[in-house]
Image (cartoon, helix red, strand yellow):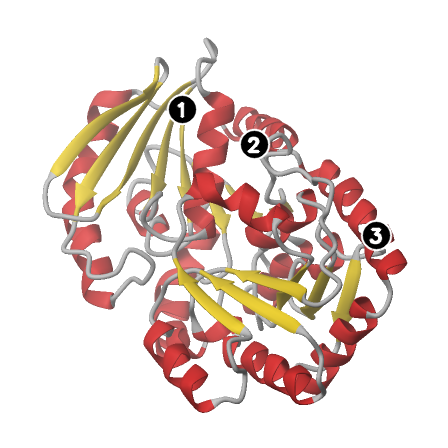
Amino acid sequence: MKILMLNYEFPPIGGGGGQAHLALLQRYAGRRDLEVDVLTSLAKPGFTIESFASNIRICKVGVRKKNLHVWRRSEIIEWLMKAKPRYRRLIRQGNYDLVHAFFGFPTGWLCYRTARRLPYVVSLRGSDVPGANARLKLDYQILGPLVFKPIWRRAAALVACSAGLKARALQFLPSARIDVIPNGIDLERFHPTERQENSDVLRLLTVGRLAVTKRLPLLLETVELLHGQGRAVHLTVVGGGALEAELRRQLGQRNVRGSVTLTGPREADEMPDLYRQHDVFVSASMQEGMSNAMLEAMASGLPIVTTRCEGVDELIGANGIVVEEAQASALAAAVVKLAGDRAARGAMSRAAREKAEGFGWDKVAEAYLQLYARVG
């Protein structure tokens, strides 16, 4: 089988959607029954073709990228206009069985235009499904009925990365038929270690793009509240994005006294150790497809404290606490509960790893292969 994969972001550009794509390619590398071409982006003008494996090559269309973790509308339009002729050339020359697009938009727009010639699969990732993302509200209003729905309707298959995201997608297009194939986790890279319990400070960690939907100011407020109660906690915020300058400004105004560290983006090979250096993973996200960072934390044996959003029902059981109301007082109460009970943290840590073991990337990759066989 020969597949063309499309993704407007791919590491080091972007976030979870690109990381998920990379993980799939790593599982497909070297397979004799599968040949894959990838069309994606590059952070500077130009065009390159890279050999990822003997059966996989990656074609990168360059744009004038200002920030690796934030897409401006002008950058998206630039990529679409430059990628379109490259895509059509690949279609003419490639003899593909199907196209797999990560993100219904902007990526899905390319294969929508050639649907009569070649069937396509769309992986819905989160931001491409209308919801509570304030930054994209206008995009949803304009593009939703005119672009998103036609792309979804013409797809041979739609895939959501969580049952929660599927539910949100069905609110937008109730007639859609949507499969669920969750995100996965590399269980060998991300694993627990013997924890060095720090009796003085509970080490909190959050990881992700610094975007409005992550509600990071709420986490800062939570730490400020805990600090005011005399609780010894420290929050590490890992990631880059549009809100970094604003978060640093807020840190200067809040009474946290060194209780929060913003690291900026970190290299992928640093992340496993970084998870293992912390005690609890915290999240205040208002919407997710399925959080890659949360899966990585779980595989690393971290208990989870999170506000409710898509993907949480599949991920959180005995391994964490789901806060129903997005309020600093509720998040702080959950953190205090864990801080005061090492036995509970230990039990949640074991449950987190056990839960994560059901989300190995090998299972995800096989599920997509079965879908390809059905569509192609």
Q: Amino acid at mark 2?
A: Tyr
4 relative to 270 in the view: left or right: left
Provide the secondary structure element on which disc 2 rests.
helix
**Going by the picture, which residue comes out furthest to the left?**
46
The answer to which quarter of the image holds residue 239 is: bottom left
**Going by the picture, which residue comes out furthest to the right?**
343
Q: What is the spatial separation of the Cα atoms under label 2 and label 1, in whole angstroms? A: 14 Å
x, y percentage for residue 219? 58, 77
215 relative to 191 in the view: left or right: left
Query: Which residue lies at the image location 74% right of the left edge and 37% below the top edge?
Result: 358
Provide the secondary structure element on which disc 1 rests.
loop
Q: Amino acid at mark 3?
A: Gly
Mark linked to residue 97: 1
Please report whichever mark, 3 or 1, sits nearer to the chain's N-terminal start: 1
2 and 3 marks in contact (CB < 8 Å): no
**Any part of residue 167 in sight:** no
226 relative to 262 in the view: left or right: right
Residue hosting label 3: 346
Neighbourhood count class around disc 2 (C-alpha, 10 Å): few under 14, some 14–19, many 20 upward: some
x, y percentage for residue 320? 78, 60
334 relative to 121 in the view: left or right: right
Mark 2 or 3: the one toward you: 3
Mark linked to residue 181: none
x, y percentage for residue 77? 20, 59
Mark linked to residue 368: 2
Please report whichever mark, 2 or 3, sits nearer to the chain's N-terminal start: 3
